[in-house]
Each structure stands twice: as structure tokens, then as C-alpha cells.
Image: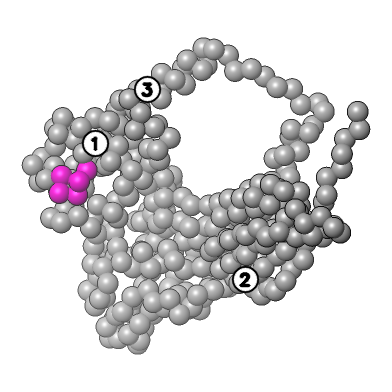
Amino acid sequence: MSILAFQMPDKVVMEKANDFHGTFEFKPLERGFGVTIGNALRRILLSSLEGYAITSVKFPSVLHEFSSIEGVVEDVTEMILNLKQVRFKKISDLTDNRIVVNVKNQSTVTAGDISKFSASFQVLNPDLVICHIDDKISFEVEIIVEKGRGYVSADEARNMELPLGHIPVDAIYTPIKNVKYSIENTRVEQKTDYEKLLIEVATDGSIHPEDALKGAAHILIQHFMLFSDQTMTFETQKMDEVSEVDEEMLRMRKLLKTALSDLDLSVRAFNCLKSADLKTLGDLARLDISDMMKFRNFGKKSLTELEQLISEKGLVFGMDVAKYRLDED
């Protein structure tokens, strides 16, 4: 039996593009293929491309992120929140990823000051304010910039080996700021039921939108090729393996559903969590430390207590609890 040929696009049209934004047209497509291709490319663009980000910082004489520095308006937590927004582009083959910034005789420290102390990286948002300082002091910060993919939380980084005195930072590696796609009707000869896929890609400037789209398509093709490999064999998961997975799922679900009132928490810590409308261990584990520091009357002592609790339970802050389907009985 012959297979009917699909109507396929012969090219991708780049309607307009610069280093930060590009719009691409893909037509004609069979009905339904617009959302299939558009959604797959969007998800890969947002989560799977490589980029550079600050992974840890070190301030002289500062031991943790809940400190303040004399002569600096912002505390360390605020400065870290600003630093993790700095976007980088690699401009040399040098392997040194350590940058020591030392600023004097000025009242504002910006991301642009970082590039003055690095021959390896260009800062793409130089006007971003890091902090405000007394112009009579010398401000110093040491940062580590690394290559990665997607997003890695500071809590995950704590489990890795960090340079002495360094504070881990939420690393936002993805160079893609936003992706939108839309589907319109288009004509092929007399038929009007075909689709045109329009994709808009916004980047931080470290990668051209065209290269980003090509990279995402390449990743998608690599994965789909596995299914078309004639030598590929499909294996059925053994029942005992399935049983082990199910048991672990049930164990974690039961643990995360544990009421905070059933745990041996101090009155201060429990009241802070209660006022934030947190009821279960899962509610607590899904939070980042930075979220909790915004709670009223929440301090370092309560944080230490909760960090110990989470560690004893084999959990981490900022974990994805949704996969355990806590809304199910």
C-alpha cells in the first residue's frame, strides 16, 4: 500500500532578526503539525540550550548570604539576587572562569564593572545595578562563571564542591528570554486548510536567534532519530522494577504529606510557617531559602532548624514535589 506524501515546507523564512530577537516562518504544514512542532521547539529553546551564569560568589569576611557589609546599602542576599541576573557571553578561549572585581571611588557598582576585570567574558547587560556603596570604601567580590544548561538552584550547588568561602547562587544558564509561537491558515494552490507556523525567539544576546532555533531543532532531531534507528530494540520494564518505583513514589508521597504540626518544630519556626499558610512537609520542601527569608519574624536560627529537618528527611529545599502527585489520595 502506498503512503501518501506529507505537504512539507521547503525552507524556513527569517522575517526579521537581530542579536536579541528573531521571527521565523515555517510553511506549509499539514493541519496539526504547527502546534506539534511549535510546542516542541519552544520547550527545548527555553530549557535545553547552553549558556553562562554566575554559580558562586565570595565577599571578603562574609560567611553566609544573610550578612551585610559596612558601607554597602544592599545586604548580601540582595546583591546575590542582582548578580544572578548578569548575562555573559564567552569571548575568548581562556579557561579561567574566576573573576575578582574591585571597585573604588564610585557610588554604584554595575554589571559593566565585572567586564573590566575579565578577558574571557562580555557582560551583555552592563547597566544592571549590583549595589550602591559609600564612595570612600573599596568594594570587592569574587565570582565564578560556569557553562551549563537550563537552571540549577543554589541548594543543588551546595551539594557540589565549592571554593572555600564561596556562597552558591541560583544559576540561570538559559540564553533564551522568551519564545512565542502562533499558527495561521495558509494556502497551497486551491487548498486552504494548511498551516503556517510563526516562531518568535528573544535571547539575552549571547546567541543569535537563528542559531538558537537551529540548536533546538538539532536536539529534537537527535532524540527522534533514536525511534527511527533500525537496530533499536525495545525492552519491557520488569514488573519488580515497576514495583520498586511505585513503592518509592508512595513512600515519598506519604513523607511529603506529613503535617508540619506533627513535627517537632520550635514554636517560632512553626508559627512562621503557619502564618505563611504552609501545612505540610511538601509545602516547605518546595520553597527556596530565599522565599523563606521573606517570612515575617523568620531568622537565621529558624532557618538552621528547618535546614536540619529537611536534611534529616532526605529532602532538599526547592525540590519538585509535583511529580509525587500530592493531590492524589
Query: Residue 96: percent from the left, percent from the top?
Result: 56, 62
Residue 181, located in which quarter of the rendered image?
bottom right
For mark 2, does the 10 Å Cα neighbourhood hold few (<14), some (14 to 19), or many (20 or more) residues? many
Q: Residue under circle 2?
A: 21
Secondary structure of the residue carrying tag 1 is: loop
What is the CA distance from the residue labelled 1 to the residue labelled 3? 16 Å
Magenta: predominant secondary structure element?
Answer: loop
Secondary structure of the residue carrying tag 2 is: strand
Q: Residue under circle 3?
A: 250
| Residue occupying image coordinates x 62% and y 59% | 182
What amino acid type should be assigned to the residue bearing mark 2?
Answer: His
Reading the chain from its start, which is encountered first: label 1 or label 2?
2
Reading the chain from its start, which is encountered first: label 2 or label 3?
2
Q: Does the magenta stretch include residue 277?
A: yes
102 to the left or right of 34: left
123, above or below 221, in the image: below
125 to the left or right of 257: right
| Residue occupying image coordinates x 72% and y 39% | 224
Q: Residue under circle 1?
A: 280
CB under 8 Å between callouts 2 and 3? Answer: no
Which quadrant, please, contains the C terminus?
A: top left
38 to the left or right of 289: right
Q: Residue 209 carries which label?
A: none
Secondary structure of the residue carrying tag 3 is: helix
